[in-house]
């Protein structure tokens, strides 16, 4: 016991050493984004934790717009909880996980989950919102039906439960390996008893992750006096059981001790590794100590940015920073073992392997943010993707729990790797493999790439839907390949991929002033309605012709030239000022509207910053201020779209500090309109980048001038390398647009 305590205290020492850290978890409101379409995870986790331990609820309604809002397993409007599961998604538009259900129950045994809105039809309980407590790394609630107070906390790979039973009649724990959200189904499950306080098993399932393998170990603080095991067909089965839907009922003597603690370790590799994760991360039984450690871990990460503003703005900011640290999630064991996408086990690895990467969303802002505040994370993410490349022969699109979901479009891993390479965030030993991976992925002959390789557009009659969206996303990724090739001295490749990066121009229909699908015979598709936004049934992806008109972040100058500078700005103004009507059948992802601009969906995220390309950064300031104050609030519905594994929040974190990577691969940040009085970004080597904002207010939203390290700086953008060297930036604000800041062509962000 003394040794266990020593291990746990030792593990906390690096965190405790940050005596200078401010208590910032107090500014986190985990409910933000838990109502409506935000789909955020609510529960107990640590930054990038493999375990997301929290409640799973019944879906109150089920249709495209409502049942969909339980993708994470939780929605603020619900007042029932079936039980607590150990894995959840956050902010996705597809549901999965909610693995390893544990129900702290009393009284009559119920083996099937209750029907929605009626907790008397099976296991599960109503609860009162007043009893629910949610903080970073901690979740608590009182289950009225069972008269049980539940408390949860977590480490990276272990969930820690504390249940206090006010009703000790037939007190038991139900372990339901059959339980699944409606997108997921178990394939093979098992649980077995090692001794009276130790149980192990696994749950293999098929869902969005089409071959998920989760192994687990459960340790209890008091003996289990009776264990009943069930499967779907055979009733009570005895000491060990295997089937598609195994359930275990663990009885204990609550009359003697009404408190029971559970440590639940998970692993992608084995039951033994799950036990090893428990031994390494929670060797003792001090719940409050582990809870405090989780708070310390969150506080350490939130202190990467010291953001000074009013309390309401700080709460929105630090909650966004908190949400941006949920995914990707760790996908290896404490000993370095992990399971690859090829289902082979890779042992004793010397890097942190990650999964849960919503790359189509996050390449735009989340990864550029992390390149500033957590470069080591970016290195491990890139290495994880390169290992996936070796295992499946191509870079990932949306990797989840050791599986490739192939969700969304384009080659979204390439911009992340290209940006990391430009910033020196790829291990030199990995550079050759990184270039091989991006080039080979870009040279596959699938999903329209066969046309792109011939420097042609993708004919709309060769793809049922989304041909323009695929073409524009490929052009973005190809810019990244070209930049890598240039820096590596591969001149032939650089020239070729530069041409591919410009293929977006082949979709330009000058008569319409939009990118339009083209048929194999060269003609543009007719009729064309730029407002038509039926969900994934047109030539765009979760969007319409207006929204995709601006999807050329890699070549703002080329996009301006398609219009002509004056028409570019007037058209962009029209985009923000026109009706927000989308018509029937539009994608629920198209939300957070200002005109046809949709903050709730990622293809719009850079668009307000395009004004800087034509010398009108003041218009960027107006738009981003409106977005930040209108669509990011301290309320359960305080997100305008899916959180998308951190991207929606990363946009706010960056924009609130006054800048955003319009082009996510060229190492620049474009100025917008900062919300704070000061933000100090803490960098490696005890360096810092201090952003001081003078005369900021609701009215003073326009940048008048910038002073960078004591020198007047008039460009509407600045460089990543300037940030990482450390220094001081002073931003002076005013109530009217500046006539000089960022206006001259040499000062524009192109």
Image (tube, rainbow, N blue to C red):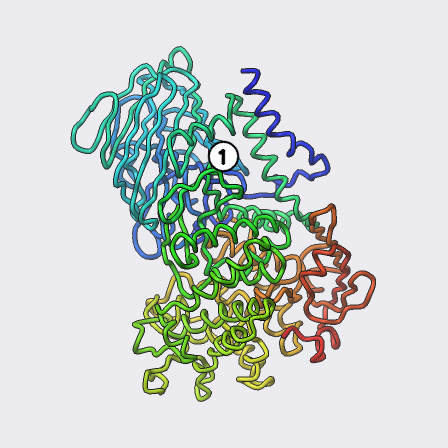
From what the image shows, is residue 231 above or below residue 197?
below
Residue extending furthest toward the top: 256
The furthest residue to the left: 234
- Describe residue 449's horizontal placement relative to residue 561 as left or right: left
Spot occupied by residue 649 in the image (x, y as percentages of width and height): 54, 54
Mark yes or no: residue 77 visible. Answer: no
Q: Quadrant of residue 389?
A: bottom left
Residues packed near mark 1 inside 10 Å, few (<14), some (14 to 19) or many (20 plus): many
Q: Which residue is most to the right?
A: 710
Left-right relation of 648 to 346: right
Name the image quarter holding the C terminus: bottom right
Tell me residue 647's x, y (percent).
51, 56
Q: Is any atom of residue 124 visible in this view? A: yes
| Between 455 and 211, the one nearer to me in the picture | 455
Is 519 situated left or right of 433 in this image?
left
Res 103 → quadrant: top left
Residue 501 versus residue 120 in the image, above or below: below
Image point (46%, 42%), residue name: 42
Q: Which residue is mark 1?
A: 334
Q: Against 684, is 144 above or below?
A: above
Q: How many marks?
A: 1
Residue at (76% x, 66% y) in the render:
706
Name the element at disc 1: loop
- Relative to the observer, which residue lies in front, 653 or 433? 433
Residue 522 in percent (x, y) is at 36, 87
**509 or 71: nearer the viewer:** 509
């Amino acid at each position: 016991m003394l040794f266990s305590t020593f291990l746990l205290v030792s593990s906390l020492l690096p965190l405790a050493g940050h005596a200078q850290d401010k208590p910032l978890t107090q500014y986190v409101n985990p409910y933000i984004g838990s109502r409506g379409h935000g789909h955020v995870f609510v529960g107990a986790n640590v930054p990038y934790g493999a375990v997301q331990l929290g409640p799973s609820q019944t879906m109150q309604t089920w249709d495209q717009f409502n049942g969909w809002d339980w993708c994470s397993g939780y929605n603020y409007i619900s007042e029932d909880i079936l039980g607590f599961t150990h894995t959840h998604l956050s902010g996705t538009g597809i549901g999965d996980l909610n693995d390893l259900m544990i129900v702290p129950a009393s009284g009559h045994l119920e083996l099937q989950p209750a029907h929605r809105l009626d907790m008397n039809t099976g296991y599960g309980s109503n609860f009162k919102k007043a009893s629910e407590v949610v903080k970073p790394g901690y979740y608590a609630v009182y289950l009225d039906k069972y008269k049980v107070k539940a408390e949860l906390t977590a480490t990276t790979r272990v969930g820690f439960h504390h249940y206090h039973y006010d009703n000790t009649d037939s007190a038991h724990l139900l372990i339901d390996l059959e339980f699944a959200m409606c997108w997921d189904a178990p394939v093979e499950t098992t649980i077995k008893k090692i001794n009276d306080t130790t149980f192990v098993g696994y749950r293999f399932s098929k869902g969005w992750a089409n071959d998920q393998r989760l192994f687990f170990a459960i340790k209890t603080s008091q003996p289990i006096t009776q264990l009943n095991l069930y499967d779907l067909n055979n009733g009570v089965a005895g000491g060990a059981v295997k089937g598609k839907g195994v359930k275990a009922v663990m009885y204990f003597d609550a009359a003697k001790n009404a408190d029971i603690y559970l440590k639940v370790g998970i692993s992608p590799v084995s039951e033994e590794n799950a036990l090893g994760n428990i031994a390494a991360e929670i060797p003792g039984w001090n719940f409050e100590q582990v809870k405090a450690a989780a708070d310390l871990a969150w506080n350490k990460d939130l202190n990467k940015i010291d953001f000074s503003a009013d309390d309401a703005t700080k709460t929105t900011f630090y909650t966004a920073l908190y949400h941006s640290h949920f995914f990707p999630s760790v996908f290896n064991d404490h000993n370095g073992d992990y399971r690859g996408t090829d289902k082979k086990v890779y042992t004793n690895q010397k890097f942190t392997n990650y999964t849960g990467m919503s790359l189509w969303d996050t390449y735009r802002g989340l990864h550029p943010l992390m390149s500033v505040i957590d470069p080591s994370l970016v290195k491990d993410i890139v290495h994880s993707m390169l290992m996936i490349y070796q295992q499946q022969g191509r870079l990932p699109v949306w990797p989840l729990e050791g599986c490739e979901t192939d969700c969304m479009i384009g080659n979204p891993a390439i911009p992340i790797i290209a940006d990391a390479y430009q910033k020196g965030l790829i291990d030199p030993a990995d550079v050759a493999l990184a270039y091989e991976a991006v080039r080979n992925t870009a040279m596959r002959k699938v999903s329209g790439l066969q046309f792109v390789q011939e420097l042609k557009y993708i004919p709309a009659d060769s793809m049922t839907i989304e041909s323009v969206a695929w073409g524009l996303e490929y052009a973005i990724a190809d810019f990244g390949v070209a930049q890598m090739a240039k820096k590596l001295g591969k001149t032939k490749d650089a020239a070729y991929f530069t041409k591919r990066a410009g293929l977006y121009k082949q979709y330009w229909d000058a008569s319409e002033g939009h990118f339009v699908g083209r048929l194999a015979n060269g003609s543009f598709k007719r009729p064309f309605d730029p407002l038509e936004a039926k969900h994934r049934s047109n030539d765009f992806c979760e969007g319409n012709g207006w929204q995709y008109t601006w999807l050329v972040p890699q070549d703002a100058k080329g996009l301006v030239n398609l219009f002509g500078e004056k028409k570019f700005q007037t058209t962009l103004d029209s985009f923000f000022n026109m009706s927000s009507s989308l018509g029937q059948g539009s994608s629920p992802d198209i939300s957070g509207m200002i005109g046809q601009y949709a903050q709730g969906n990622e293809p719009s995220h850079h668009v307000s910053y395009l004004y800087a390309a034509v010398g009108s950064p003041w218009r960027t300031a107006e738009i981003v201020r409106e977005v930040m104050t209108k669509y990011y609030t301290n309320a359960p519905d305080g997100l305008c779209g899916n959180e998308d594994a951190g991207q929606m929040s990363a946009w706010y974190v960056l924009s609130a500090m006054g800048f955003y990577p319009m082009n996510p691969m060229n190492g620049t940040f474009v100025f917008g309109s900062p919300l704070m009085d000061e933000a100090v970004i803490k960098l490696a080597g005890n360096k810092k980048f201090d952003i001081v904002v003078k005369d900021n207010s609701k009215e003073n939203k326009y940048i008048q001038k910038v002073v960078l390290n004591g020198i007047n700086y008039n460009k509407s953008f600045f460089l990543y390398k300037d940030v990482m060297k450390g220094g001081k930036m002073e931003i002076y604000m005013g109530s009217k647009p500046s006539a000089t800041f960022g206006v001259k062509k040499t000062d524009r962000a192109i």
